[in-house]
Image (cartoon, rainbow, N blue to C red):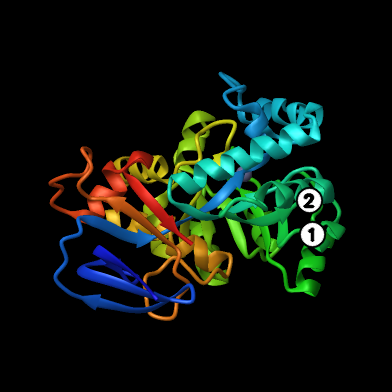
Amino acid sequence: MKEIAGTVLVGRSFEPIRGRVVIEDGRIEAIEEAETASTDVVLPAFVNAHTHLGDSVAKEAAVGLSLDEAVAPPDSLKHRQLAAADRSDLVTAMRRTLRYMQRTGTIACLDFRESGTAGARALREAARPVDVDPFIFGSGAESVLDVADGYGASGANDDDFSEQRAACEERDAPFAIHAGEPDATDIHPALDLEPELLVHMVHAEQEHLDRVAEQSVPVAVCPRANTVLEVGTPPIRELLDHTTVALGTDNVMLNSPSMFREMAYTAKRFDVTAREVLRMATTAGAELAGLDCGVIAPGRRAALTVLDGDSDNLAGAVDPIRAVVRRATGLDVKRVVV
Ligand SMILES: [Zn+2]
């Protein structure tokens, strides 16, 4: 049995409780209110809801490029760099990114992996020695589902993904798709595929929001990536009012995959509360991927990020949730409990 003491952000509302989390066999046994001298802040470890770890080989290579020039398949800079990368360099680069994600408090990510079955295999290999578990949305032919956990489609205007959609149905694997990133034209066609997850929805209008609510489709938003690629700002408030919204950092090419950075940007730029942002960064992503973490509650897997509440950065903060969401950085992470 293990105990972690401090200010614990408990349950789906992250109610701050002074006390301890009791862990038995990797599961949360109990949360106990108690006097403690610990200044640590204990929160659920982050689940990054959208990444492209493959472009760890092309960091900061896309300066000044448009969405199409930077990341669109098959001829963008990203795809040329992926094709040119040596396999062992690619695996090493993805592994280092996963290690950085772990250091910054992340336990899992939902990754769109390019390059078909070989690409999915390379990511599995990269993740083996790291304590971050990638949930892989594979690409290419539907046989990628032999290795990947689900299918990740680039967008409904790019190709016909009906076979991959059907294959996911058959195997009970989730089908995810980019939608509404440069404009709204691919949103209805994406929704016609009845996806388990939409990514971006920057250009979602009321008719799309109504359909998202009706079909109960969760959405992963990546506001920093949208800013870098100058495609606009997602209607996060409206999306939250219609469905489950999770937060992702998108292309490693464009941004560092730190959930602290994504949370701070989202909290300061959009009409959302710190609690909502923390839920988008933890609970929401975990639920999308069917992971048993993302909430500090009895019976859940003990995947926790422990921050030093007495760090030079966080000491004296009045509101622990705001401090975690708007102020904390990777430097405040004491450890990640897996
Ligand atoms: Zn993406």
**Label placed on residue 147:** 1
Residue 111 shows in this picture: yes
Label pair 1/2, CB-CB below 8 angstroms: yes
- For badge 1, the amino acid type reads Val
Residue 181 shows in this picture: no
For the N terminus, which image quadrant? bottom left
Q: Residue at x 45, y 64 (%)?
A: 303
**Residue 168 to residue 65: above or below:** below
Closer to the camera in the image, 220 or 243: 220
- Residue 115, horizontal then vertical, whole percent: 80, 43
Q: Residue at x 74, y 53 (%)?
A: 138
**Label placed on residue 121:** 2
Decide: few, some or many residues near mark 2? Use Cα within 10 Å; few <14, some 14-19, many ≥20: some
Closer to the camera in the image, 131 or 176: 131
Q: Is mark 1 within 8 Å of ligand 1?
A: no
- Residue 237, horizontal then vertical, whole percent: 36, 54
Tell which circle, 1 or 2, labels the residue nearer the N-terminal end. 2
Spot the residue most to the front.
Answer: 1
The answer to which quarter of the image holds residue 216 is bottom right
Q: In this view, does 60 lie to the left or right of 262?
A: right
Q: Which residue is drawn at 49% across and 59% down?
A: 209
| Tag 2 secondary structure | helix
Closer to the camera in the image, 95 or 279: 95
**Residue 40 to residue 222: above or below:** below
Q: Residue at x 61, y 49 (%)?
A: 179
- Residue 326, horizontal then vertical, whole percent: 28, 44
Closer to the camera in the image, 191 or 26: 26
Ligand 1 quadrant in view: top right
| Tag 1 secondary structure | loop
Question: Distance of mark 1 from mark 2, alpha carbons?
Answer: 7 Å
